[in-house]
Image (cartoon, rainbow, N blue to C red):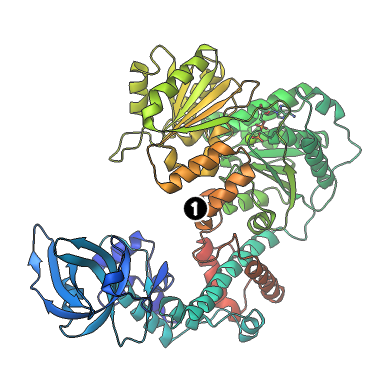
Amino acid sequence: MSEMLFSGTEVLKGVGQAKAEKYKKIGITSVYGLICHFPKNYLDFHNNVPIGQTIINEYNCLRLKIKNKSVPQAVRNKLVVCKAVATDGTDDIEIVMYNNVYAFQYLKVGCEYYMYGKVTENLFGKVISSPVYIYVNEKRFIQPMYRLTQGITVNMIRADVKQALDIMRNKPFETLSEDLRMKYNVAPLMWSLENIHFPDSAAAVQQARRRLAFDELLRLQLGMSIMRNHSRNVTAFRMDSAINIDDFIQCLPFELTDDQKKASSEIIADLCNDVPMNRLLQGDVGSGKTAVASIACCFAAKNGIQSALMAPTEILASQHYKTLCGFLEPFGIKVCLLTGSLTPKKKALLKSEIASGEYDVIVGTHAIIQKDVEYKSLGLVITDEQHRFGVSQRSALAEKGGTPHKLVMSATPIPRTLALMIYGDLDISIIAQLPKGRKPVETFAVTGKMRSRAFGFVRDRLNEGRQAYVVCPMIEDSESDLFAVRSYAENAVKSDLNGYNVELLHGKMSAQEKEDVMQKFRDKQIDVLICTTVVEVGVDVPNAAVIVIENAERFGLSQIHQLRGRVGRGQFESYCILITDNTSEECIKRMKIISSTTNGFEISEADLQLRGPGDFFGNAQHGLPPLKIADLSCNVELMNAAKQCAGEILSDDSMLAKPCNASLKMEVIRLFDRDIIG
Ligand code: ADP
Ligand code: MG
């Protein structure tokens, strides 16, 4: 393997520091990184049309002979315009290029090219702007198109990728043995990298894609398996199935739904086994996962075992703390809240009490998985995921206190195959029904013109004694036209919300400030909370019955669904008002979907289709490394193949320690962006 392959892109000819910086902006930091910057699509110059058949204002491909070129003109500051006239034998067309003297100078009068660009029409005829072109006798009719950034053109990337591939070709490496390649029907790596960029045919693209997607899924599988294997062949504390907590369940302030009952008994059965539980509890927002968690904690406590409940934010942690205290303390089960914002003194005291077993249930954010927190008998770890935790935090917590039973609670309804992919070999409990009497949140999408009417409606609800949320995408005003909570609140108290108690809640406030505001909101001292998406996760105020979401186009459907889950949590009719001035087809479609269904499953499917899996399964939401090429939503065959192949490789070399697996190991580390193996 060539050292140069992993050097910065500056080692390439024609790449200076400035260009290397630009590459970094799109995530390309090395020569190999450039090779892994796969085309976003391809241009096929086979599909060209005569000038008369071009579609105006669309991209068209033409076969053109240059008739004459004018001298490039500097127009105004730094803008250079290059013009030429060309013909396809039937008609003439003008070629215009901006700031691209370099590409222009290669066009020769009398030569023929295939050109692809946007065609417009003016008084003098048709114009093709900034076309991408190849010579007619060029062998490659299929040309890659890339995701670009300011100052980087397609032609630059193509030339640089060519160089990068040359470097790799000098000393190619391969991560899969020929046997495995044959068995799983995948092409060699070098061939695939060449053909993903510079394919001879559409079939070659397919082959290359298959190999590269397979690699990505394989690395993902290997990484997940290795992390999982850290805790295999170990036993967990086997709890006593004879211990009865019926009295606890009887005393909950509501009757459990059938799904909650089923999930609870599945969890208790797992806890009574010495194989560590590894269970996902899936349920839409408001389905009552916390109650199920409290049952698990109660059962563990009665067994003399400590439980940890980890939430993604301090607000949510402190809310869980309150809920669990309310349920558990009457039964003599002690609950504490350990967060990053405690004073050092309080924290030290709390930690020593946790270590001595004073508390049965420890609630907190990631602070509770830090190395310095010692437990007396940690046997159950519950992660309230709500989209937010990454794989790394989960595994860090798993390492705490040997091998506790693990329960992950998630509000993301994801298909089973994908859940398995993300969470590994786990069991799944599903709470599909909402508690009785819960009314679906009525959702409306309106434009800004309707804002004052919408607020009239909000005031009516406030006057009935309800409370409301208003969500804006930003905290402070910025260059974008997006609403920001601060200025929004200032305006609102002078107009639409004049006379009401309005407060802000956003991510720049300290944990204490946020908690104080939430407490005031719970105590009904605040009528309207103007906030960013910090309220997204699990905040539970049953008296809140309206949520207004500004710049609704900015939010993913699943996120809106989460946000709207903040209302409709009590006995009151609840409403979600989405305000957006975006009238694009996609936005309208999204607003229609979210207004027409409250089924989280349907919504996440739609989100997946509209935004693509890259986004949906991006780091932010699931803690999975971002995938470049594999499509988790539809490639089940390839996913299974990768899983099987990973098993095969690991059964022979469980830590990828053998020299033959060295490059594969490196790729796994690269994917997860840290060393999960060593
Ligand atoms: P999730 O975490 O799944 O979004 P929560 O556990 O926060 O949902 O529960 C949402 C609300 O529903 C809480 O106010 C909770 O007290 C209430 N709740 C939970 N289970 C039931 C039930 N079986 N019947 C009525 N209300 C319930
Ligand atoms: Mg919850």
Q: Is residue 370 visible?
A: no
Residue at the limit of the structure toward the right, as seen here: 242
Q: Amino acid at mark 1?
A: Arg
Compared to residue 530, the image places residue 657 above or below, namely: below
The residue at which mark 1 appears reads as 611
Residue under the image location 73 percent in, 44 percent down = 430
Is 66 on the left-hand or right-hand side of 210?
Answer: left
The image quadrant where one finds the C terminus is bottom right
Residue under the image location 38 percent in, 14 percent down = 498
Compared to residue 510, the image places residue 217 above or below, namely: below
Quadrant holding ligand 2?
top right
Is 559 on the left-hand or right-hand side of 154?
Answer: right
Where is residue 351 drawn, in percent x and y?
62, 35
Neighbour tally class for label 1: few under 14, some 14-19, many 20 plus, Cα within 10 Å: few
Q: Nearer the viewer, residue 357 or 100?
A: 100
Residue under the image location 59 percent in, 20 percent down = 543
Q: Nearer the viewer, residue 661 or 586?
A: 586
Where is residue 281 drawn, in percent x and y?
71, 44
Label 1 CB sits under 8 Å from any ligand 1 atom: no
Q: Nearer the viewer, residue 454 or 483?
A: 454
Q: Nearer the viewer, residue 663 or 528?
A: 528
Image quadrant where residue 470 sits: top left
- How many marks can you see? 1
- What element does badge 1 sit on? helix
Q: Is residue 335 visible?
A: yes
Image quadrant where residue 675 sits: bottom right
Where is residue 622 drawn, in percent x and y?
57, 51
Where is residue 521 drawn, in percent x and y?
52, 20
